[in-house]
């Protein structure tokens, strides 16, 4: 049985893909976009989902830089986000400490995770810093698949909204690059 208030960490590509105008979305991404739209709708309208954010607003800024504000889904997401930020619980608004080199203290650095995308380390560090280790909701970014098992060792889980699409992207971008 799930906690009454499910906590999540939302990768930027979920609201970004949901807010993409339909005519700008490539045909092969339409199913994934629909999954993102449905997830944002669930997040906005279901009170049992609690978004975990960082106190320095790194994720909030990334949303602002990547989510379209001129579409109905973008407007819906930002209206909800602004309201949510006014009521976020202290335990879900976490300070991400950095060391003298600017690296996240709560990121699980080891030989299997050190090369993970620098711009996405904040999501992993945030999950690791939270007492409940909320899952990271991922639209379909294939590079996460290559690190999924390594993060599981630390109790950090990735939930793909479209795992099939992520697998195709992983094979195209990562596995094909390694074979060259």
Image (cartoon, rainbow, N blue to C red):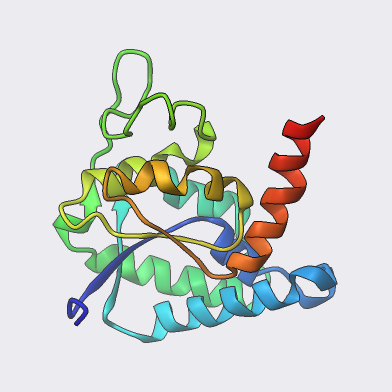
- From this view, report whether residue 172 is shown above or below residue 30: above
Question: How many circles with numbers are drawn on the protein?
Answer: 0
Residue at the (37%, 44%) spot, across then down: 151
Query: Would you identify the image quadrant in which residue 1 lies?
Result: bottom left
* Extreme residue in the front direction: 179
Quadrant in which residue 51 is drawn: bottom left
On the rendered structure, is 168 left or right of 120? right
Left or right of residue 170, residue 11 in this image: left
Q: Is residue 26 visible?
A: yes
Across and down, in percent, residue 164 comes to 64, 67
**Which sits in the foreground, 42 or 139?**
139
Left/right of residue 25 with respect to residue 124 in the rendered view: right
Picture residue at 52% right of the left edge, 37% below the top: 119
Residue shown at 28%/37% (left/top)?
96
Q: As drawn, which residue projects farthest toward the bottom?
A: 45
* Residue 168, x across and y down, in percent: 72, 58
Where does residue 17 sit, x and y in percent of width and height?
65, 65
Residue 120 % position (x, y): 49, 41
Quadrant the C terminus occupies: top right
Which residue: 31% across, 63% down? 85
As drawn, 116 above or below 144: above
Which quadrant of the structure image shows residue 84? bottom left
Does the rendering let one see residue 57?
A: no
């Amino acid at each position: 049985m799930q906690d009454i208030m499910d906590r999540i960490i939302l990768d930027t590509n979920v609201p970004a893909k949901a807010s993409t105008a339909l005519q700008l979305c490539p045909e092969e991404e339409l199913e994934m976009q629909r999954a993102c739209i449905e997830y944002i709708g669930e997040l906005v309208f279901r009170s049992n989902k609690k978004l975990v954010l960082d106190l320095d607003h790194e994720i909030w800024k990334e949303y602002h830089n990547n989510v379209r504000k001129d579409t109905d889904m973008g407007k819906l997401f930002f209206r909800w986000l602004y309201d949510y930020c006014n009521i976020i619980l202290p335990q879900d608004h976490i300070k991400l400490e950095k060391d003298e080199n600017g690296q996240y203290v709560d990121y699980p650095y080891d030989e299997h995770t050190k090369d993970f995308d620098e711009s996405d380390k904040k999501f992993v560090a945030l999950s690791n810093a939270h007492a409940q280790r909320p899952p990271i909701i991922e639209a379909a970014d294939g590079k996460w698949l290559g690190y999924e098992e390594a993060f599981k060792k630390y109790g950090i889980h990735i939930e793909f909204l479209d795992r099939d699409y992520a697998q195709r992207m992983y094979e195209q971008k990562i596995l094909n690059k390694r074979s060259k």
